[in-house]
Amino acid sequence: MKSAAFDYVKPAAMAELFELLQSHGDDARILAGGQTLLATLNMRLSEPKLVIDITGLQELRGIHQVGDRLYIGALTTHTEIENSALVSQHAPMLTMAAPHIAHRAIRNSGTWGGSIAYGDPAAEWPCCLCAMDGHVHLQSPNGSRKISATDFFIDLYTTALAPDEVVVGADVPLASQADWFAFDELARRHGDYAVAGLAVAASFTGKVAQRVNLAFLGIGTIPWRARRTEALLVGKTLDLATVEIAVASLKAELDPLPDLTHTPETKRHLATVLARRLLSAAHANRSAIAV
Amino acid sequence: MELTGEVVINAARTRVWIALNDPAVLTACIPGCEAVEQVGPLEKTARMLVKVGPVRAKFSGRILMSDVVESERCAMTFEGSGGAAGMARGRSQVELSDEGESTRLHYTVQASVAGKLGLVGGRMIDGAAKQMADQFFNAFQLHLAPAQPDADKLPTESKAPGAAQVQPLVTHSRSEDMTVAGATVTQQPTSKLTDDMEWLRVKWFAMGVLATAIGVWLGAQL
């Protein structure tokens, strides 16, 4: 199936993009990597009058270290993040998560900013950003602003993005020696939308956890930070008994939305399977370092 | 897909019933609703633009009501078609009960989707349905709340004494809502006789609208 007819514009400057957005409003869609938008158009689930191709805007590309944060431009592809030495050094969680994003062909085209602006509850990047306390950078004709990822994702496919704003990039804190990250997800086949996924961003003093951020994907309408369980783990040694306490706490805390094939109970169970795996790995890692 | 929910609405049961059956109120409160039309005494059609994530699909739906008990409950079956996007059909029950001076509205929806919507949206149908329901009831609350100052001015109103007492402080904002909701309320207090007549008529109307509303969510959930 092919999409309905639409006009296509490829602006060469941000100013031009904002002008188009202002004059066309909701009739215009922004095209970045096109891995969600083009499928939606071809299935005629959406018929915008205008598609604005932003791939000509060079200022939206690139990965840079800015102070104590790692900034990734919106048009950076999943593959570029996966292969970036800068990312694997400073934000290893992203390197771990990238291979889980769909398939190679999609990773070659799909973008960081596209995934963030779309805000799919099963997407990897929004979940990683929420786990790492990342910031989303937005720009509008009135200027730029930064918003914490946990405030950016509001509801199912609903973000804090204003109609005249675009996502220009997002940053995460640079990883230090004390940090430990993990990412894993469960899907029926590799590359499918995950049934459940978990990103862990922890920091330790010796074997004692100072911070254990747990962000689940595929569970709620937005990345789900398990704040109660996180609070429970602060100041604890992550031994196997503590891991079981965390799992029990997650069982009570998580209230997953079902999908057509998985009940909330299934999802809750799978989420705790991931939690047990990743937290046990954290324990093993810290024990090895301490020895 | 199965969705069950309960909301407490800050108004007397009879007012909630009337509002739920007022196509003007429904059109204003249902996210993306373009029109609600009466086709037969128990049958309505509705058109809406569903916006969930990347999906912008126009849906038209048909709602058929049954088991209508005025101000208490009704059941409806609905069918919505989104053209190339797919279709949805299902059944819903709505029940009203008193909760102090407010009204408790309990609803259940069982629905299935077919076509590309099922393929693409199946993963998120429950989330989308909840989102639509929340948006509807938030707007519905807002509609009823600003109408209350109007109700205050009408001491003869015997049908909904609760309404006059409930939160007369909510005078704020939303002038468009005020006019629509105000218009709705002024229907009932005229006189008790016409009131009863009106009730009969309104009851069927209301059921239809409710049904439409639910149909619209269904469409929307996709």
Image (cartoon, coloured by chain):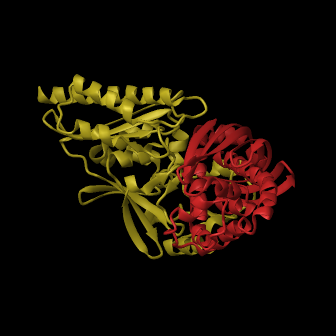
Chain colours: A yellow, B red
Q: Residue at x 45, y 57 (%)?
A: A74
Residue A280 in percent (x, y) is at 28, 26
- The answer to whether residue B146 is above or below residue A271 is below
| A4 sits to left or right of A239 | right
| B176 sits to left or right of B210 | left
Q: Residue at x 43, y 48 (%)?
A: A126
Seen as rendered, the residue at the extreme right is B40
| A265 sits to left or right of B205 | left
Front in this rendered view, residue A251 or B163: B163
Answer with the quarter of the image where residue B138 lies. Answer: bottom right
Quadrant, the N terminus of chain B: top right
Q: Residue at x 58, y 48 (%)?
A: B98
Quadrant, the C terminus of chain B: top right
* Residue A72 visible, this orientation: no
| Tally of numbered tags | 0
* Residue B2 visible, this orientation: yes
Residue B90 in percent (x, y) is at 73, 38
| B160 sits to left or right of A208 | right
Front in this rendered view, residue B168 or B192: B192
Residue A145 in percent (x, y) is at 38, 67
Front in this rendered view, residue A17 or A240: A240
Q: Residue at x 71, y 41 (%)?
A: B116
Residue A5 in percent (x, y) is at 75, 59
Answer with the quarter of the image where residue B183 lies. Answer: bottom right
